[in-house]
Structures are given as C-alpha cells and as structure tokens.
Image (tube, grey):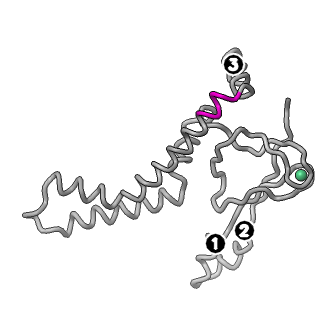
Amino acid sequence: MNLLPAIREDHDPFAIPALLPGPQRLLIFLRWTSYCCPHCKTVFHKDFWPSNVRLGCGKRACRKCGRVFDDGSREWPELGRAQKFRFYLPPGIQAITGGLLFCAIFTLVIAPRDVLNIPAGVIVFLVFLSPTFVWCLVRLLWVQRSRHRFENDPHAMQSKMETQQIN
Ligand SMILES: [Zn+2]
C-alpha cells in the first residue's frame, strides 16, 4: 500500500540578515526543517540539520487527524551506505570531530619531544575523540533497535523479499 509522503518545509528566516557583514552572519545556522502530515499539515517533527536520517518503520499515524502516512523514516537495513554514514556522523558531529582531531594534532605538535611516543599519541587521540566514540555508541543502540524492528516486522520483511525478487 502506497502512503502519502510527509510534507517537508525548510525554514531559514535569517538567510537575508546573515548576508550582511557583522556578527549576525552566525544567524545563518539558525534554520530548521519541519515535517508535516500530508493530510492536515500538522507538524510532527523538526530537524535543525537538513536531510537528517531518521530510523523507523516509515508509517506514522497523525496525532491530529489519525490518518496514516509515510513519515520518511526507514529502518537500518533499508538505508544506503551514504545514509548510514550520515546517521552515525551527521554534519554537526563531523564538524565537532574535525575540531577535536585538530586539537589532538595540535597537542601532539606542541608536546615536548621526549614524552612523545606511539602509546602517548594513541591516548591523546582516544581522549580527544571520546565524545565522538560515545555518540557513535549511542547511535549503535538505535541501529540495533532498528535492525530488531526490521527483522521482527512482517511488513518490512515482505517488502524486503519483494525488493530481492525485483533484483
Ligand atoms: Zn494529519
């Protein structure tokens, strides 16, 4: 059964003020995407990053009108490689990880030469990248839950078999 897809609306109210010189340029980052029920236009989800990957069975019943629609979420086995990567490392986390990597390298560059060795370098990287590791560990739990849902949902399994027959 084909469900109507959710309506996506991008909001960037500060796009024009951010074009002017000055500190208000940072307002460019204050933007969001809202997803609405295709039947009654009730917002059911907001994201502060565009094209965020959401895990779920894809079906959602609207809290206002009660009708079922495709909310755009997909289970882990249905995602492509790029989407899987984006789920683990969305743009904000990529930026933070890049900054932490820079700090780790900077620490190694300014460290006295007599204390530098491979184990110390590994420890510096592990300490600086630990927030990213914790983030990925939490994401891994979500992925496991998604896999479990996919393997135990007869509808998802049916669509998987149909996909395999087509291929
Ligand atoms: Zn609705």
**Image quarter of the C terminus:** top right
The local crowd at label 3, few if under 14, some if 14 to 19, many if 20 or more residues have their Cα within 10 Å, is few
In the displayed structure, would residue 163 be above or below residue 10?
Answer: above
Residue 166 is drawn in which quadrant? top right
User: Residue 157: which quarter of the image?
Assistant: top right
Real-space CA distance between mark 3 and mark 2, rounded to the nearest whole angstrom: 41 Å
Residue for point 21% across, 56% down: 121
Q: How many marks?
A: 3
- Residue 54: give its label: none
- Amino acid marked by disc 3: Met
Q: Residue at x 47, y 61 (%)?
A: 95
Residue tagged by mark 1? 28
Residue at 41 percent of width and 59 percent of height? 131
Magenta span includes 104: no
Q: Residues within 10 Å of mark 1 (few under 14, many from 20)?
A: some
Confirm or deny contact between disc 1 and disc 2 (CB under 8 A). Answer: yes
Pinpoint residue 82: horizontal percent, then vertical percent: 55, 41
The one nearer the camera, 67 or 167, is: 67
**Residue 152, magenta (yes or no):** yes
User: Is the N terminus in the top left, top right, bottom left or bottom right quadrant?
Assistant: top right
SS for dot 2: loop
Which residue position holds label 2? 12
Amino acid type at image mark 2 = Asp
Q: Nearer the viewer, residue 143 or 27?
A: 143
